[in-house]
Image (cartoon, helix red, strand yellow):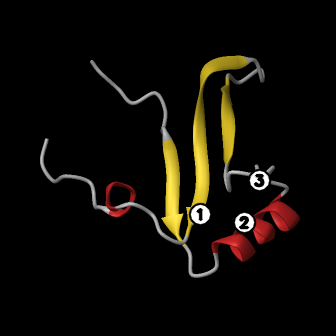
Amino acid sequence: MKRVTGIGGIFFKAKDAAALRAWYQRHLGIDVQAWGGTAFPWTDSAGKPAGGTTVWGPCMRCTRSTTSPAPQGS
């Protein structure tokens, strides 16, 4: 059986992306990089690297491909 093993990225629109990034950095300790987001390395239950990353980043002008709903059906 095939299964999902991770998420490639989480991107979302924000009216004030810079302020939202600063809030996440200040209150949640997210290490926001100069490009405006961060990459979380995947780890196993023991904290060892598991060979992937999930990218996170709020944006003011996300492209259509990052804001379109997922296709319906199988």
* Image location of residue 58, percent across then percent down: 59, 63
| Residue at position x 39%, y 56% in the image | 66
How far separated are the C-alphas under marks 1 and 2?
7 Å
Kind of residue at disc 1: Pro
* Image location of residue 42, percent across then percent down: 65, 28
Mark earlier in primary sequence (3, 2) = 2
Residue to which mark 1 is pinned: 58
Q: Residues within 10 Å of mark 1 (few under 14, many from 20)?
A: many
Mark 1 near mark 3, Cβ–Cβ under 8 Å?
no
Kind of residue at disc 2: Arg
Mark 1 near mark 2, Cβ–Cβ under 8 Å?
yes
Give the left or right position of residue 70, taking residue 57 as reference: left
Mark earlier in primary sequence (1, 3) = 3
Mark earlier in primary sequence (1, 2) = 2
Question: Against 9, is 1 above or below?
Answer: above
Kind of residue at disc 3: Val
Residue to which mark 3 is pinned: 32
Q: Nearer the viewer, residue 46 or 9?
A: 9
* Image location of residue 64, percent across then percent down: 32, 61
Mark 3 near mark 2, Cβ–Cβ under 8 Å?
yes
Residue to which mark 2 is pinned: 21
| Residue at position x 46%, y 27% in the image | 5
SS class of the residue under badge 1?
A: strand
Q: Residues within 10 Å of mark 3 (few under 14, many from 20)?
A: some
Q: Nearer the viewer, residue 32 or 3?
A: 32
Q: Quadrant of residue 2?
A: top left
SS class of the residue under badge 3?
A: loop
| Residue at position x 39%, y 30% in the image | 4
